[in-house]
Amino acid sequence: MTAIATLSEKFQISIPKAVRDEQGWQAGLEFVFIPKGKGVLLMPVPELAQLAGIAKGAKTHSVRDRKDRF
């Protein structure tokens, strides 16, 4: 799906309805802007509950502990 929006004089962009509907985005949702080369990746800020378990299975043997930090 291709959608186009225009930056207003107040530096605001309206997200096209087709994109909002496809993503399930509602008013009040917070977003983070991640610079990517000459563009920007727009991602909804996840809720804390959505982050539970994302590091499951991560190897921690090479992670420094606080004792060797300055």
Image: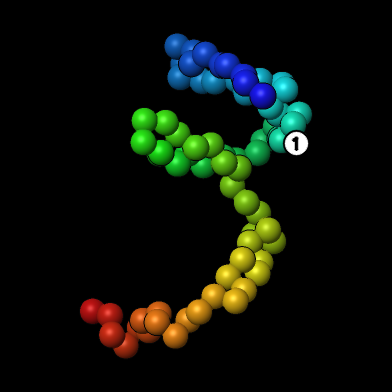
x and y percentages locating residue 69 in the rendered image: 28, 80
Q: Nearer the viewer, residue 29 or 53?
A: 53
Q: Is residue 27 left or right of residue 67?
A: right
14 vs 9: above or below: below
Q: Residue at x 45, y 11 (%)?
A: 9
10 vs 27: above or below: above
Structural crowding at the residue carrying mark 1, measured as other residues with C-alpha within 10 Å and reported as few (<14), some (14–19) or many (≥20) = few
Let me know if residue 16 appears in the view.
yes
x and y percentages locating residue 20 in the rendered image: 71, 29
Quarter assignment of residue 1? top right
Q: Nearer the viewer, residue 57 or 54?
A: 57
Q: Residue at x 65, y 69 (%)?
A: 53
Q: Residue at x 49, y 37 (%)?
A: 41
x and y percentages locating residue 21 in the rendered image: 76, 29
Let me know if residue 26 appears in the view.
no
Quarter assignment of residue 52? bottom right
57 vs 32: above or below: below
Give the residue type that dot 1 points to: Gly
Q: Nearer the viewer, residue 5 or 59?
A: 59
Q: Quadrant of the C terminus?
A: bottom left
Quarter assignment of residue 40? top left
| Residue farthest to the front, as pictured | 1
Q: Is residue 31 left or right of residue 63?
A: right
x and y percentages locating residue 16 in the rendered image: 66, 20
Q: Mark 1 sits on what residue?
A: 24
| Residue farthest to the left, as pictured | 70
Element marked by disc 1: loop
Q: Is residue 13 left or right of residue 24?
A: left
